[in-house]
Image (cartoon, coloured by chain):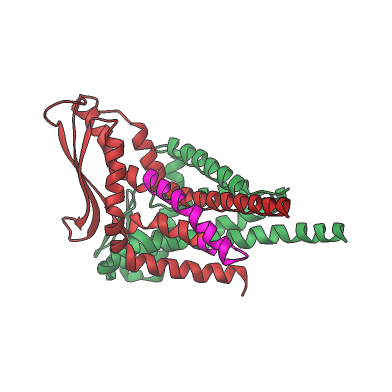
Chain colours: A green, B red
Amino acid sequence: MATTPARFALKFVIGFAVLMSAFEASRGTAFERFVIEDVILLPTVKLINTVTPTEQVSLEGRSLVSAGATLHVTRGCEGVEMFLLLIAAILAFPASFKRRVQGLLFGSILAYGLSIARLMALHYILRYSPSTWETSHGLILPLAPIFLMALFFLRWSSADLAPNARDQDSHAA
Amino acid sequence: MRREWRWALAAVAALTVGATCAEPYARVAAPYYGLVADLLAQWHPWRIDEVVVADDPNGRAVLRMTGEVFQRRGDPSPAARMVVRIQVGEAIEVPIVFWTVLLMWPATTIRHRLLHVAVGVPVFLGLEGITTGCQLVYAMPKAVALSLGDHDLVTSWDRWSRFLGDSGRLALALAAALLAISVAKRLQSRSRANRVAAA
């Protein structure tokens, strides 16, 4: 099954808008608190304290608080959108069910790792290099994980196309 | 070179350009954002005074829109004065994603690449209007509603702004680039068909 860039783009944007709307509708629910606080923020705090025990970071509401810095994790800063972009892209791209499940599984692991790494980086930047905060927080740290996710998607989509291409070649032969 | 490595290098280059050129880009683009904001204000009880790059109270460069809202169109005195700020780094995200995808997309000849760019320019201007342009004015309807005593109203502008803030602008930038590529490809194949027919 072939797709054109425009068709993929349309499906991708609609898919992302639907997923984002669903997540926005869940704001304030136990599910949203579980995802943001228990799945993303708590492990981030634990990891920071494991890697750098002197930091003594604690989670207060949705803020990562330490002696030298307080990082307020606001709407859109939690990294959930990375998962949603991934899901929307994988659903918009023509692939077998098995490949989609593989893509979602490995992509989610990558997105989760990047979300946590991003929050850790934000904490350390705020603490030790506040002069670079603006560029890091405003541009590099939102975009770099998305670019990495895009590279993962490219790899996944080309791996999915390869067998089809081989199949088409053999039909042509 | 493998495709993934090409894209990875392009991403690094794009981030470098973004980190170094965010403020100059915002200065160049500010008049266009002002034009978009003025256009939107024509149908609403708002007035846009200026869109400029300025320092915020913390000394950071931001894109700043100042304007006024009125309870109704034609009211002599404003209900509120508005100042909306967007980080310059945020303003350059959309162009970075759009142009990276558009310029990195495989093209067989220089002519085809130029066609991608030619189709990309108007698409990009529209994209900037519906993303950063709208982000600059999204708070105006809320201010009008507040001045009329409606404190709980969530406007469609608020929803759009949230969508853009939740990486929707990046999704739109990618989609817009792919749309421009599709249109360019269609134009290419049409001109090829015309040449074959003529021959």
The kind of secondary structure the magenta stretch mainly shows is: helix
Residue range of the region highlighted in magenta in the rendering: B103-131
Where is residue B136 drawn, in percent x and y?
29, 45
| Residue furthest bottom as drawn | B1
Nearer to the camera, A52 or B182: B182
Q: Position of residue B163 (x, y in %)?
A: 41, 42
Query: Is B122 part of what is drawn in magenta?
Result: yes
Relative to B69, residue B171 above or below? below
Farthest residue to the right: give it: A173
Determine the residue positioned at 32% across, 62% down: B22
| Residue A9 in picture, x, y percent from top left | 56, 47
Residue A151 appears in view: no
Residue nearest the viewer, comparing A64 with A162: A162
The answer to whether residue A34 is above or below residue A150 is above
Asked whether residue A88 is drawn in magenta, I would say no
Q: Is residue B154 visible?
A: yes
Q: Quadrant of the N terminus of chain B?
A: bottom right
User: Is residue A162 found left or right of B81 in the rendered image?
Assistant: right
Q: Residue furthest front?
A: B198
Q: How many marks?
A: 0
B161 and B1: which is toward the camera? B1
Instruction: Indicate the quadrant where residue B47 lies.
Output: top left
Left or right of A173 on screen, residue B130: left
Image-quadrant location for residue B26: bottom left
With B92 as the anchor, is A80 left or right in this view?
right
Please tell me which residue is depicted at 48% across the width and 49% down the height of the picture: B171
Looking at the image, which residue is at 47% across and 42% down? A20
- Which residue is found at the position 33% from the left and 31% from the top? B154
Question: Horizontal and vertical percent for residue A74?
Answer: 33, 49
Quadrant (top left/top right/bottom left/bottom right) for the C terminus of chain B: bottom right
